[in-house]
Image (cartoon, helix red, strand yellow):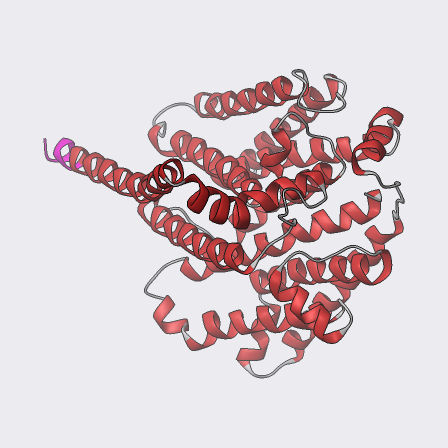
Amino acid sequence: MNSEKSGNLASADFRARVLKWVLIVTLPITAVAVAAVLFPQQVWNDFLYRFFWGPVVSDSQEHTVSGVPEGYNVVSTISYALLLGIGFLGFYRLARFLRLKVDVQLVLASIPIFLFGGLARALEDAQLYQNGLEYLFISPLIYVLMALLFSATIGVALYSERKQKDRSERAKTRTFLALMLILLGAVMVVSNTGFLIVQANPLVPLSLLAIAIGVYLYAIEHGLGRVPAGLLSVGMFFVSLAAAYAALFQVDAIWRSEFVVRSGSLITPHPDELLIILAIACAATFACFLAGKVAKDWRLALLAAPLNLLMFFSHFLDGAATYRGIDFYGYAEKHVVPVFLINWSGTAATLLLFKFLMVLALIVVLDVLFKEDLAKYPYLGNIAKFGVVFLGLAPGVRDMVRISMGV
């Protein structure tokens, strides 16, 4: 009787928390939507479109539309930073309530999803998506899409791990397989209903799904938890599918000619940049690793900690890709702070130093200055680092792949 009562209380508490966050998210959106309807000129035209939606439309067309340039502005940068902070705070609260371990294992298992985000964005640069789908793969909507994929995978994994804890391993696995089949169905619908310029052979996603399921089963059999195993499997399915489309771009004449017509620019691939950019990022990360390993001071040794090295690598990759793209191939930066630094220094190589100092400052704050305070909040520091890795790795991969594809 007592256990049943406590279970009911826990369920009621969970519903109350969900309702609270639903209201936090939906009420401001509803208020803005109503204001846009009541005052379209002031709210939509002069604010929302000018600072938020207009840049997305211009980005999809790769030129200024209705007088609004593509890229970020001061208003959108500050707004997205605040929303991102709120989002990660919400993720921390939810992870703590669900007793979700946001450890190195989970972050590493999430890397394929990060890579998919970058590859999918590069495919938008290559004009793969059409009929409105392209907007989902331009920031900030692509971050929402990745968050939904990430959350759905964790939700299904936790359900099979906890709600089905008394069921057989086969039953738990079937729950995850149901998610994979739903994702495969979504891919098939998108690729066969005119949302993509070209269609890959249906055997490609089917084969990649089979491989991803095999990875999931292998990971579970060798002791990996269902949450990281699920993230790894889902991420591998999508990133390998995106990589297949990136390879298809190199040989599909129809897609390439359509890109030239839509973008008005020629295709100038630089496949060697994959190695060059990776080499720069790896060399800089290795230098941090060596500095941490030879250091006698425990604070300097933090440079070689796994999550810290991953933060360094992801942002060195982003910085290296931006440097090569701008200084050697005429690409342009769209973020406010990097634009200022590049204009001030005259070279995008400055971003490598900026990225190093930014990550170093975060390590000092999380692992030195507030180390004891953060001990009271399990995984809060890891979640902050998780976000930093994502914010560096996804755009870094996008820029690197875009340069290599020549789009």
Frontmost residue, 105 versus 356: 356
Left/right placement of residue 84 relative to residue 70 reads left
Residue at figure coordinates x 69%, y 30% from the top left: 129
Q: Position of residue 271 (x, y in %)?
A: 87, 47
Frontmost residue, 372 versus 171: 372
Q: Which quarter shows the N terminus?
A: top left
From the image, give the main secondary structure of the stretch colored magenta: helix
- Compared with 343, 235 (above or below) is above
Q: Position of residue 349 (x, y in %)?
A: 76, 69
The total of numbered circles placed on residues is 0
- Compared with 127, 323 (above or below) is below
Residue at figure coordinates x 60%, y 21% from the top left: 184
Q: Give the quadrant of residue 342.
A: bottom right
Is 380 inside the magenta-drawn segment?
A: no
Q: Which quarter shows the C terminus?
A: top right
Residue at figure coordinates x 73%, y 31% from the top left: 128
Farthest left residue in view: 1
Left/right placement of residue 111 relative to residue 150 reads right
Farthest front residue in view: 41
Frontmost residue, 287 versus 352: 352
- Compared with 127, 290 (above or below) is below
Would residue 279 be visible to someone looking at this image?
A: no
- Compared with 85, 161 (above or below) is above
Left/right placement of residue 1 relative to residue 82 reads left
**What segment carries the magenta color?**
1-6
Q: Position of residue 366 (x, y in %)?
A: 46, 69
Residue at figure coordinates x 64%, y 52% from the top left: 71
Left/right placement of residue 128 relative to residue 216 reads right
Q: Position of residue 284 (x, y in %)?
A: 73, 68
Would residue 405 be visible to someone looking at this image?
A: yes
